[in-house]
Image (cartoon, helix red, strand yellow):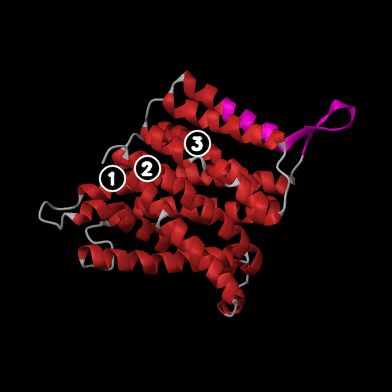
Amino acid sequence: MQHLGEIISLVVALSWTVTALFADKASHRLGSTTTNVLRLVLASVFLALILWVGVGSPYPVYADGKAWRWLAASALVGYVFGDYCLFNCYLAIGARFGQLFMTLAPPIAAFAGWAILGESLSWKSGLAMAVTLCGIAISILSRGEGHHVKLTLPLKGVLLGIGAGLGQGVGLVLSKVGMEHYASLIPPDAPARMGTLVPFASTMIRALVGAVGFLGVLALERRMKELKGAARDRRGLAYTLMLTLFGPVLGVSLSLMAVRYTSAGIASTLMALTPVFILFPYAFIYHQRIRAREVLGVLVSMTGVALFFLL
């Protein structure tokens, strides 16, 4: 099918928009760490069912120790660190601004690819990164008294947003390494569908490790009792179920699939449209006014992402 990768990338952006809206709701009801534990446990169950139906095995067959190590590292960086920052960012400044900071992820992924994998990086990448940062600055900075520049958002939320973009970008590079190694382990006589389901199997490994990681965070925070309370919150569980289906199950798996059918640059640019897609539904749900400066900032930031990959 022509443009299959581009279509999948747009579906991913829409999926992540839905995920962000439900994650915002669930985090406010259940707490960010509890929400992450529940969604990753649910994701592991759903992914096991997909693998069972697809290849007859409910667990990631053929994955060796090296694949597990790379994918586990990506889970700890991308899920435990990155999503811990992201979900707490939602609590601090909301999903609309939280997703704006996620435009940092593609440029950071490119820099991580250069640092970790030795991939090439040109001066154009620096220019694109500067444009992305300018877009974010337009959205979150304003002129105060005496012409001083001031933040329009809490500093805590801004730092969490930066951490979320950093975790997502580096985690993506680590997961790419793990997934490619995993794919190389599949024998020629394996079911044909196994190759297609490698992204889902890789995501399952990441979800399992991420769930264990967040349980550790919950234990360190001495908030394990919150899990019992969450089990009785039907609305919170419904929000978590929806963000699980559209996030770790469909969104993450399809994002890994998208780069198999189109260039990583085009896929990353289209998948980074979530901050644009979320503006109006978020404003409608929370009855917030969208300022022209914020729209301009999102568009400039998106331009930076596009320049990064398409120059």
Callout 3: SS: helix
Q: Is residue 131 left or right of residue 308?
A: right
Q: Mark 3 vs mark 2: which is more N-terminal?
A: 2
Q: Residues within 10 Å of mark 3 (few under 14, many from 20)?
A: many
Question: In the image, is 127 to the left or to the right of 184?
Answer: right
Q: Give the alpha-carbon distance from disc 3 to disc 1, as whole Å.
A: 20 Å
Of 52 and 162, the residue lying toward us: 52
- The label shown at residue 108 is 3
Which region is colored magenta?
130-151
Task: Name the magenta segment's main secondary structure.
Answer: helix
Image coordinates for residue 173, horizontal then vertical, percent: 40, 42
- Indicate the amino acid at tag 2: Ile
Q: Nearer the viewer, mark 3 or mark 2?
A: 2
Residue 216 visible in image:
no
Q: Residue at x 18, y 52 (%)?
A: 186
Q: CA distance from mark 1 to mark 2?
A: 22 Å
Left or right: 47, with 89 as reference point: left
**Which numbered dot is residue 7?**
2
